[in-house]
Amino acid sequence: MDEEVQFCLEEAEESMQNALMHLEKEFQKIRAGKATPQMLDGVMVDYYGVLTPIAQTANINTPDPRQIIVQPWDKSILNLIEKAILSANLGFNPTNEGEVLRIVVPAITEERRRDLVKQAKNEAEKSKVSIRNSRRLANDYTKSLEKDGLPEDDSKNLQDKIQELTNNFSEKVDKLFEAKDKDIMTV
């Protein structure tokens, strides 16, 4: 029975950790006004007939907070990379300088910043819902263990530990959101 209790806790924690990691990835996609190479993570380049992530076809640098420089390893695909960035619909207009693409990241308006904060808050709430769903599943499993002979005190202790995990991960989501909010609203 102890193994099943431990399994229940580990599964709940792993599920909650996955929700947190997903939130971090979603937050990376929300542009805060500063140029980062991650802004181009979703861009796929048609590289000799195979859709390839842009990071596998070029060096991506940010020499300052307003620019992204894309330097392809194979100069012949510069136009393909430019086309891929435009078709990714990121709001970027790359400038082809012969050997590199220069992308000037436009400044974000106050209204757009508020929209981005709403988007970030929405993602944070989705993560909290996922964490609460993990708690519910773990509690359901605990109740089934109780029916199978787990003492009531042990069941109560396990449910308390699951709630503690839930609270810890919800706090982490709140802290991540606060940091993202500050990042977005900083001009």
Image (cartoon, rainbow, N blue to C red):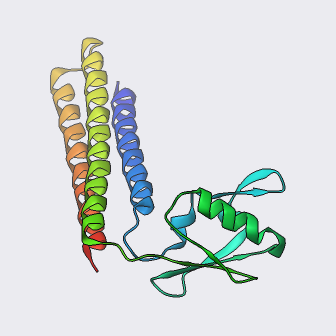
Q: Position of residue 77 (x, y in %)?
A: 79, 68
Q: Residue at x 61, y 63 (%)?
A: 85
Task: Please tell me how many numbered marks the rendered image carries.
Answer: 0
Against 129, residue 77 (above or below) is below
Expressed as whole percent of the image width and height from the top left, the position of residue 130 reads 32, 38
In the image as oriented, which residue stretches furthest toward the bottom? 63
Left or right placement of residue 182 versus residue 89 in this view: left
Q: Quadrant of residue 131?
A: top left
Q: Is residue 35 above or below residue 148?
A: below
Q: At 23% from the left edge and 33% from the top edge, which residue is drawn?
A: 158
**Where the N terminus falls, by quadrant?**
top left
Percent across and percent down for residue 105 are 47, 76
Question: At which x and y percent is residue 3?
Answer: 39, 30
Q: Quadrant of the C terminus?
A: bottom left
Q: Residue at x 43, y 62 (%)?
A: 28
In the shown orientation, is residue 4 left or right of residue 168?
right
The residue lying at 30 percent from left, 43 percent from top is 126
> On the image, which quarter does residue 95 sit in?
bottom right
Relative to 24, residue 73 above or below: below
In the foreground, 17 or 145: 17
Q: Considering only vertical position in the picture, is 65 above or below 82?
A: below
